[in-house]
Amino acid sequence: QKEVEQDPGPLSVPEGAIVSLNCTYSNSAFQYFMWYRQYSRKGPELLMYTYSSGNKEDGRFTAQVDKSSKYISLFIRDSQPSDSATYLCAMSGHSGAGSYQLTFGKGTKLSVIP
Amino acid sequence: GAVVSQHPSRVICKSGTSVKIECRSLDFQATTMFWYRQFPKKSLMLMATSNEGSKATYEQGVEKDKFLINHASLTLSTLTVTSAHPEDSSFYICSARPGTGDNSPLHFGNGTRLTVT
């Protein structure tokens, strides 16, 4: 079983739809969770950063972490064509040797159709 | 804030030559920078951790003599692909974290697309 599982998609939705992106993980030491957005031929851009379980909202984006289920989600409300990109989840553990290393999902490619 | 600049964005070189990629933290100091490689439709693969003033730490399977890393200052790390071969063609991305904590989020450069002919 891979440490982080993420459905690669592709996911295609109409403009204005609510998008749900998810990752599951197996390592219970992960405490810090991130979502990155990567446009084609560009580096990943940090969207959301959360610690432990709970929700975090930033504009149209909401990140959810459920540590009991080892499941994280990113919701995008009122999706726009400019949201079309690959979304990567990433996570890391608590302080300690190697804790700084991020473990990435493979990314979900999202297309928002006008 | 937290801008990481990477140069060049694209480079084409002939087999057997060397290519240098620069990574700069523009508005923060980074004692540690990370170099990743990304294959099409694959996730980011950590190649090495660049440490200012000391040797880089390479991940298993990454040839240190082929991928030379130098971190000469708190804002600059370079990756040199030596004696490049077509199989080295890939998307290389550097990253750094502005926070002091080990788990503060990484910020990425815009990547370098290397094509070896």
Image (spheres, coloured by chain):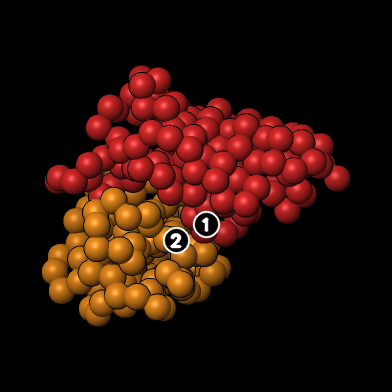
Percent position (x, y) of residue B109?
46, 65
Give the residue number, with chain letter if any, for mark 1. Answer: A45
| Along the viewing direction, whichever of B88 and B17 lies nearer the viewer | B88
Q: Quadrant of the rendered structure where residue B31 is?
A: bottom left
Tell me how far mark 1 sits from mark 2, CA to CA. 7 Å
B55 shown above or below A90: below
Question: Would residue A2 be visible to someone looking at this image?
Answer: no
Please identify which colour was used for chain B in the image: orange
Percent position (x, y) of residue A65?
44, 33
Residue at (24% x, 57% y) in the render:
B101
Q: Dot 2 falls on which chain?
A: B
B78 shown above or below B47: below
In this rendering, position of residue B97 left or right of residue A10:
left
Look at the numbered disc 2 and give the secondary structure of its residue.
strand
Give the residue number, with chain letter if any, for mark 2. Answer: B108
User: As shown in the figure, which amino acid type bears the numbered disc 1?
Assistant: Glu
Q: Are marks 1 and 2 in contact (CB under 8 Å)?
A: yes
The tag on residue A29 is none
Q: Which chain is red?
A: A
Percent position (x, y) of residue B29?
29, 75
Residue at (65% x, 47% y) in the render:
A60
Q: Quadrant of the rendered structure where residue B4 is?
A: bottom left
In this rendering, position of residue B50 left or right of residue B8:
left
A46 shown above or below A112: below
